[in-house]
Image (cartoon, coloured by chain):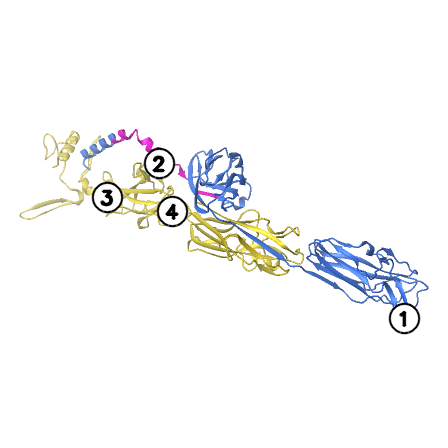
Chain colours: A blue, B yellow
Amino acid sequence: MPFIQQKRTVALLLVATLSLTAIVPLALNRIVRAASLSEVSVRFDRLKVSTATTGTVCAKPTTVGTESSVVVTYPASYTLGLAATFTTDTTTNTASWPSGAVAWPGVGTATNVTGQVVTFASGDLSVGTLYCFNWINSAAVTVTATPGATNTGTVATNLDSSAFNTVSIADDQIVVTASVPQSFSFALSGNTDALGGLTTGAVATSPTPRTATVNTNAKTGWLVWAKDSSTGLNSALAAKTIASTTPGTNGTLVAGTEGYNTGVTSSQVGGSGTLTVATPFVGGVLGRGSGLDTTLRTLASSNGTADTAVLTLKNNAAIGVLTPAATDYTDTITVIGAGLF
Amino acid sequence: MPTSFVSFLTILSVSLFSAVPSSTNYTLKAFDFGNGGGSGSSTSYSLNGMTNGQTGNTITSTAYLAQPGLAATINANVPPAPTFTNPSSYYERLKLVVAIGGNPTSTKYAIAISDDNFVTTRYVRSDNTVGTTLTIANYQTYSLWGGAGGFYILGLQPNTTYKVKIKAINGNFSETAYGPVATASTVNPSVTFAVATTLSGTPPFAANFTSLPAGSVFAANADAILALTTNALFGGAIYASDSYAGLKSTAASYTINSLTADLSTTGSGYGAQVISASQTSGGPIAPATPYNGGADSVGALATLLQPIITTTSAVSGATATVRLKARTDALVPSTNDYIDTLTFTAAMVF
């Protein structure tokens, strides 16, 4: 460029500069913006329209300086609560924050809400570090009533600013339901119980006690009942019944005194239920129990599920000197169980 | 000799020695044309020509420097309009490919940018961000501006139309005027996200374990279908939470706990697994640990949001399928009121 032309250009530039002096500030004010945050994210914990939500704000500053505030401009038509509702923390569920995020220093409850603009205090931030904080009161923000993907806002410190976007949808939830079917198992370990020869000198008891085992997922528990066919040990040949000893009452047989009863002990591997032997049939001591009759009587019960609940049934008998001799004394005991679903 | 050149030499005369040719007003120091000059002659004609003069005699004084040659021969060419685009729905950057306009590789270019038709002009810095002043450091060669692949101007505002223009320089006193303007626009940051199930595309959404007898692993009768598209440069995540950290029965006062486990070897449990994840472009999306197991391995659901799908970049047309599985043992109370509510949300890092 020829020199004179250069000088002319310089002169023109000077004139132009002077003449623009008055209007440049206006123009700069119009376009001057903060630098961009290098990363920004706002997570709304609920996306369903018209739903109150908590959330998380994250940002990574780019400008060296001293931050003193963070301003979140929520999307238009999101409903905001008062500043006092914007309570925050930096400790809840931080594992779900974006990778590398750290707690935003100096953040507290919002200091101001004006329109969609919420101002929080902020401590000084380091360039290149991603900071996050949660707003933990769902009363602070309610998602817009309109489904859409143009819900734009900004996160700004006093140095940097960037836009974010979120979405509002008709429903963000799936309701999951399930049914667990009923199960109940009940088993007797055997169907005979030979007491052997009875003598006046001792109380006879089951040499191999039969067991009744219950497994069930009945949430309320289960019951086991028993009755017998003869309300005692009956001999057809002798036309004699060694009568059940006081059905419904717990007692202990004594050698030499005629009697017949059933005692129960229990155990349980697992389950929520507490297994209880009915008071009349509590066994555990030779000859202790209650007689059976032809009416079903509760042997034991539980108030919850059962894994291998075992009732051990011991039948006890004693004779007196006048008890007729016979080899056909017999009784048939019926044991049943049921779950309370 | 042009008048301007005469004036130029007049100014210089205060520091030059007298030489031939000369007058009272001027002295011409030398006739050489520098390394680009040359001459030809015949019996009838003599032609002197100059293509470049940078190695000719240089004249200096304490106040002035006069370099040889004509400025027009060393000026860079005015760069044509660059290629200025937004190739991938960017909201904070635009791609620029400098057009060299026949300039040599050593030519440097300065890039002016404006969002108000150059009422206010800013300049692209060597770190590809935008600054308020133009310094010599902001002049870069075509190669440093990314060559044919171009580069991204960073730190722009979303949803804004920008104009750029470029000037070139070969050396001192050789800068061109700005070339033609090219225009491109950023878009707003965006995310679209949708929830559906394999049974229904519209809410309310439901999934049911019709029956959970003990000892086997069952899948719910519907999978969750999650759809995501975003231009978030740093990607983001889809998060899931549930109401009870399990399937809860009020009637039984019991919860089938959600857990991270292989249900085929677990007595009782409930959880989620991502059984497919794909996208049309970008991403990719990927299941987050522990929801990335196969077969009967599930991840625990919790009342606090957990990332279940992640992507580290913008993605389009992404779809993930989430399956719910459960198993009970003999002690899980029988009832038909087990319930849980899954919540899905998505958050992007812009």
Q: Chain of mark 3?
A: B
Q: Is residue B126 left or right of residue A340?
A: left
Which residue, given by chain and number where applicable, does mark 4 sit on?
Answer: B90
> What percent of the width, then of the height, locates residue B155?
38, 41
**Chain designation of label 4:** B
Q: Give residue B138's quadrant in the image.
A: top left
Disc 4 versus disc 3: nearer the observer: 4
Please state if A187 lies on the left or on the right of B276 as rendered: right
- At label 3, which amino acid type do we have? Val
Q: Amino acid at mark 4?
A: Tyr
- Residue B37 appears in which quarter of the rendering? top left
Question: Mark 3 vs mark 2: same chain?
Answer: no
Mark 3 is surrounded, within 10 Å at the Cα level, by few (under 14), some (14 to 19) or many (20 or more) other residues, namely: many
Q: Residues within 10 Å of mark 1 (few under 14, many from 20)?
A: few
Question: Residue at coordinates 37% horizontally, 43% vertically from top-left?
Answer: B159
Mark 3, residue position: B78
Single out the mark in the foreground, 1 or 2.
1
